[in-house]
Amino acid sequence: MSEFIAQLIRNKLRQLTAEEIGRYGAQYGFNITKAQANQIADYLRKHSYDPFNATDRRRMWKELAKITDQATAQKAQRLFHEIIRSYGVEHLFEK
């Protein structure tokens, strides 16, 4: 079951649209412009990284900080950790 959930998460990240990113930003209190949302969506589509791998996640957060700013990337990282804890899938992200 864990691999199934992991694949769903990978697919969702690759398929995120700029509109969805904008909605998530507003929902969770992020200031993300339309241009930034487009850049993030484009980055996620073009770069295949494993969100379950700590090294790949660090690269993703660094790229997010370049696209937005350091404070936004840190806020997103904290939210990411809160979400995986709330869904009880921390064990998938221990690599």
Image (cartoon, rainbow, N blue to C red):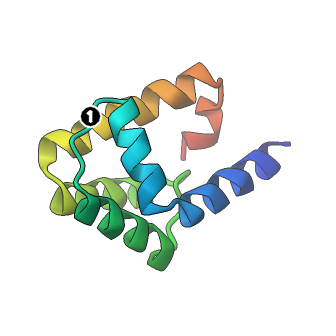
* Furthest residue toward bottom: 46
Q: Position of residue 59 (x, y in %)?
A: 32, 61
Q: Is residue 88 left or right of residue 85?
A: right
Can residue 63 be seen in the rendering of this structure? no
Amino acid beneath label 1: Lys
On the picture, is 64 further left or further right than 22? left
SS class of the residue under badge 1? helix
Q: From the image, tell me which residue sits under label 1.
A: 75
In percent of width and height, residue 24 lies at 42, 40
Quarter of the image for the N terminus: give it. top right
Disc 1 crowd rating (10 Å Cα; few below 14, some 14-19, many 20+) is few
Q: Quadrant of residue 33?
A: bottom left
Q: Position of residue 4 (x, y in %)?
A: 81, 51
Question: Residue visible at 41% across and 61% down?
Answer: 18
Vertical side of 54 occupied by 88: above or below: above
The residue located at (21%, 41%) in the rendering is 31
